[in-house]
Image (spheres, grey):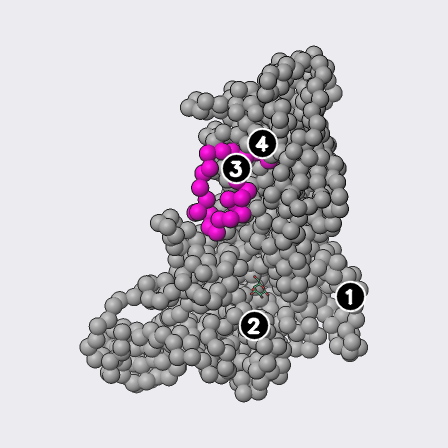
Amino acid sequence: MDVPDGFASGAPCDTKSIAVPSHWQLEGYGAPQYTNTEYPFPVDPPRAPRGPVGSYRCMTQVPPSWLDAVAHGARVVLRTEGIDSFGELWCNGTLLGATVGSRLPHEFDVTDLVHDGDNLIAVHVHQWSAASYLEDQDMWWLSGIFRPVTLRLLPSGLPSDVRCHADFDPATGDGILTVTSDLPAEVGVPQLGITGSTGEPISVGMVQPWTAETPRLYDVQVTTPAGTVTQRVGFRRVDVSDGVFRLNGRRTVLRGVNRHDFHPDRGRALTRDDLLDDVLVLKRHNVNAVRTSHYPPHPDFLDLCDEFGLYVIDECDLETHGFVDFGWRRNPSADPQWRDALVDRMRRTVTRDRNHPCVVMWSLGNEAGTGSSVSAMATWCREADPTRPIHYEPDQNTADTDVWSQMYPGHDAVSAIADRAEPALPDVHADAARRGKPYILCEFAHAMGNGAGATAEYLRDVERSDRMIGAFVWEMFDHGLRTSIDGRPTWGYGGDFGETLHSGNFCCDGLLFPDRTPSPAMLDWAALNAPARIRVTDHEVHVRNIRDHRDTSDLSYRWTITDESGNEYDGPLIIPPIARGASVTVALPVEVLDIFDAPHGELAVTVHAYLTNETAYAPAGFEVSNSTAEIPATAGAEDDTAVAVVAPTPTARTLTVGPAEINRATGMLTRLFGNPLAGPSLTLWRAPTDNDHGGGLNGDLTPVATHWSRMGLHRLTHELLDLQVDDRSIVTMVRSAPADSDIAVVTRAVWSAQTDVVRCHLSCTPEGEWSHPVARIGWMLQLPDWTGDFTWWGDGPGESYIDSRNGTRLGLWRRSLDQLHTPYVRPQENGQRSNVRWGELQATDAADVTGLRIAADRPIGMTVRRHSLDQLARAAHDSQLEAEGTTWWHLDVAQHGLGSAACGPEPLPQHTLMMQPQALTLRFTATG
Ligand code: GAL
């Protein structure tokens, strides 16, 4: 639609209404585009291409009282919080100026332009501008007025620029308040009975300091004869001393996530409720810190972080990552003509957010290279706010920063850094300076699809060394946008909106699914960071308070015991409050020990810590952590291995042993307890995860999924080599191998049965050279389409993998097959239950099948699903998965770890699965 002359002054034109704030691409105009680093237009800085322009108009009323106030010297200001990327604004037909810095505020004085009655505000928003070169964050390109626009009255004589520095002296427990303002004023803190003046430090005596664990806020009143301005503060001190990052004098560990503003329907145009949801989900999952990757968040988010208690690394709206493709040639960070633009962004970030106690560090931006313009930002920032350290990850020499930051380093490198034993920098001075600085993992654990793995190992290094500030998982959200494909609702990613240049599903790499449902990785991270770290044995409970600033007097405890028949026992457990960083050990109550003493099968004893009282973020009784110990069965528990076995009976095509029927030609089961069924066939492959497909941070690793496909793991064929029958058993030898390869695995299966029990002892031996990891070592059964539930005695209730299993625990669990499936945005390996002793597919009345229980002689991984590996590997969206009329049941001795290779390291050596001989005995019984 062409914009007519006079648009800004109200000329009639054919307009449509659109919600503001919003992105026009999500309101039916144009389409979103997702790129990671790539600029979606030819790179020729500072020239940006002409692109779509969104023209907005709105009428607004100015209250008559404002006009009275204006007559007495008040000012009226038009403030925009976020316009992407470049806005030209008019008020009643007069051009006000332009906005740049999409995630930064702008103010225009419209005092002389507003009048009684209707006032016309008009804005042209250009999708592309020179500023787009500075805003190449890994996210959707979404345009428009996406944050609030407000008209504000600034009464005459009232301060309009108030800065509060609420310091806390850890040595005395006193607060020191310094308020500066554009007008001299009186300062008061009614809750403390304190008064003073602007411009001078006011000693406020003993205060409760602000921490994320104790987010105590006070109202500061700044008063002039014209009235009072109120500013919320929290007294706290952030500093780096002796190479340690401290809050209120104490080393404080940041247990963080990287967070973009995101919503699957609204993009970055968030409501207060969205922001509150985000804060609640983080608090309920024991996250204590957020890096606002990679721009200042919606301003309300910081209010909520102050209030609920989250540490924030506030990052400037700067990323020029696309220049990496040109060897960083013409990168604005190193080009003096961009210096003012960069410094201006930093200035506006700090000015907007400096009064927030939650902000504990400034970040100059992300992946914008280094250079004089970035250094100028640091210089400005350090002068303007010496009270917070400066972060910037690309600065590996720490020339501009107070902390050393890295993303996705290998675990060994991090351990060396924790030991202060990292390799030296070539420049001795730079090396000495960096060695004296604390270290932060601003990004690690790439939570794309199923993963990341090994967060526990990194966190252990972070916790054990006081050089370490903390670690931030990449990232909070899967940025899937709600759309539909072939009429089915789905989460859209790059390429789903007709984009030719895009980065596929690389934006779906969060701890939360697009609709904010926590993924298994979120539960893993939550368990690792639980404030009460519990360890249970067969006689005692050990609890460590991992908080840095408060005791555990807010927590209560219970014990529960579950057995594999579903019996449950529980009771309270008294654990005295534990001081910050301290531990206690208490004996398990006598009732528990009595249960252990009586004859029993295997037991799971769990200690749960929960909130005694309601808090701002969760109700009373909310469970913050738990831990389970496995208590072995007492001697004399049921053992039927000595019961007489039945002899196999041959027929023309099959061999029958008890309730099992085996095909003579294949050596595989064809029927079990009357159910048609096939297998067990050796399986070494999985539908690759996003991390399996990953080539590491710099793309220089060969993805393990590529090795798997070169090895042919996805196309094994199985050939019966030998079949022996005697009066007790059937023994088969099956060779599994891909075409055109000399690697193989031979499975020996020994089948025996009693009247109502079938046993199979499986052992496998590799042949040839297996030089790369395999995805899994296990066997798979194919069963009829199953409608009954799956019940198991093992870890649950969610899925888990060898390097991501902290969010699960031993118990008796029951789920439908659909619930076992984790709906990763792009389908991939999912749904494994680990440490399983037995699993049972239950029959339903409607189905013509017999319930089947499989018990293993060692804990194994079980996965039951309605989708074949091939379909899982091929489908691009979860919504495209079709039921195939078959149920697959994987019985895995081991699976390869998850790792982080979509943008980081592969699984750790101890989580890497190499082909090796394995053995497993399965016991099959019919149920129900
Ligand atoms: C980092 C970057 C993030 C994101 C991540 C991969 O290099 O800072 O913005 O792109 O990689 O998902």
Q: Which numbered disc flags the more N-terminal residue, 4 or 3?
A: 4
- Name the residue carrying label 3: 865
Viewed as shown, does residue 19 lie left or right of 808?
left
Give SS at disc 3. strand
Compared across the picture, whether 67 is left or right of 304 comes to left
Spot occupied by residue 513 in the image (x, y as percentages of width and height): 49, 51
Pick the front one: 200 or 644: 644
Residue 186 seen in render: no
Q: From the Cβ of disc 2, is ligand 1 less than 8 Å away? A: yes
Q: Please tell me which residue lies in front, 578 or 456.
A: 456
Amino acid under label 2? Answer: His
Q: Which residues are magenta?
A: 868-890
Q: Quadrant of the N terminus?
A: bottom left
Q: Which residue is mark 2?
A: 321
Per the model, the C-alpha gap separating discs 4 and 3 is: 11 Å
What residue is pinned by disc 4?
A: 781
User: Of all residues shown, which one is farthest toward the left?
Assistant: 12
Label 3, residues with CA under 10 Å away: few <14, some 14-19, many ≥20? many
Image x and y of residue 765, in percent: 74, 36
At x 60%, y 30%, the residue is 679
Decide: is 132 above or below 357: below
Indicate which label's residue lies in the foreground, 2 or 1.
2
At mark 2, the secondary structure is helix
Q: From mark 4 to mark 1, how far is it between C-alphas?
A: 49 Å
Nearer the N terminus, badge 2 or badge 3?
Answer: 2
Q: Earlier in the sequence, mark 2 or mark 4?
A: 2
